[in-house]
Image (spheres, helix red, strand yellow):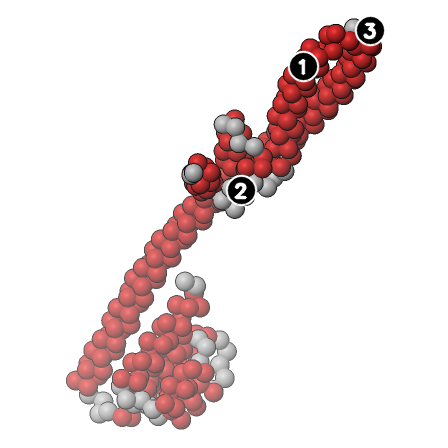
Amino acid sequence: MGLKEEKHIVMEFQKKILQEAGCSAEVIAFLDEIEDEVFCEYYCFCFLDGMPIEEVRRIDSVPVQNWKDKIKRIREERTGYLERLFVPDAQVTQQISKLHEKAGRVFKETEELRDTINTTLKQTLKIQEEALVQQKESYQSTLASKAELLKDREDKIQSLLSEIEQNKSVWENEKKDLLLKLEEKKTAVKEEEKKEAAFTEENPINNIERKKKRWHFFCKENKKRGIQDNNNEFIETYLAEDTFNDAQKEFLIQCLEEGDSVQEMKTYASASLTPAMMQRLRQVRKKRRERP
């Protein structure tokens, strides 16, 4: 608390004393005009002694050389007023002195109370400041933890995206290899057909047996080709894009391993369903298919 605020508290206490003594609002207003707390205190004594406000205004308006001269003049004017007001005997003078001493003690107690209040306020402000510092540190620690957590999540996301990109590249390479192998097999089959045709023309007796062997060969190759085409379609439909999350992709891969085709998966696979829900739909479909 600053010096200005302390002076303000003292002056407000003086005005409160005058109010309780029954002084008029004009007196209180006059004290509000006095900026120096020492002059305000002396004028407060004058009003408590019963001095009229006109007399106090006259005293305050008289020019003086310095601060000490003005205090001396206020004392002299106040003493003269009391001498004119009361019979100048020793008993009255003694009573007046006692009143002044009592008033001095009151102001001293007021100052001590003010110091106590200031100390209490300072302690309270210190406690509040420490609490705010602790709260600020706690917030900063929480924000740092959240920032670290977000960074870890971002790193995991980037790692997954990188892994997906790598898998896409692998899948594309595998797809190219499969297509190349299919082309090579087609070429080999055509060459085999040419050889068989030429051999058939030369050996017509064994033509039926060769046709049977070629039929079995084509059936085996077509079966392998169907499985590979199904795998390629599965990759392009469920793994190559970000439509399905990791848990859903893992479930669909399991279904593929258990023999479900891509067409069968389309009846229960959906990005909006959890693996458990898709499994239930899959079981319902199998039960309906098994019914006679």
User: Where 219 sits versus 139, above or below?
Assistant: above
Residue 140 placement, left or right of 216: left
What is the x, y in percent for residue 77?
Answer: 36, 86
User: Where 144 sits versus 77, above or below?
Assistant: above
- Of the image marks 1 and 2, the number of the one nearer the N terminus: 1
In the displayed image of the protein, which residue is found farthest to the left? Answer: 91
Amino acid at dot 3: Glu
Choose between 177 and 288: the one closer to the eye. 288
User: Where 56 sits versus 35, above or below?
Assistant: below
Choose between 29 and 228: the one closer to the eye. 228
What is the x, y in percent for residue 98?
Answer: 20, 78
User: Where 67 sits versus 207, above or below?
Assistant: below
Separation of residues labelled 1 and 3 (CA atoms) = 18 Å
- Of the image marks 2 and 3, the number of the one nearer the N terminus: 3
Residue name at image x 36 percent, y 76 percent: 12
Instruction: Confirm whether residue 134 shows in the render.
Output: yes
Residue 267: image tag: 2
Residue name at image x 41 percent, y 62 percent: 1
Q: Are marks 1 and 2 in contact (CB under 8 Å)?
A: no
Q: Nearer the viewer, mark 1 or mark 2?
A: 1
Choose between 229 and 144: the one closer to the eye. 229
- Residue to which mark 3 is pinned: 202
- Residue to which mark 1 is pinned: 212
Amino acid at dot 2: Thr
What is the x, y in percent for residue 27?
Answer: 37, 88
Residue name at image x 78 percent, y 15 percent: 193
Q: Residues within 10 Å of mark 2 (few under 14, many from 20)?
A: few
- Dot 3 lies on which element? helix
- Of the image marks 1 and 3, the number of the one nearer the N terminus: 3
Instruction: Confirm whether residue 195 shows in the render.
Output: no
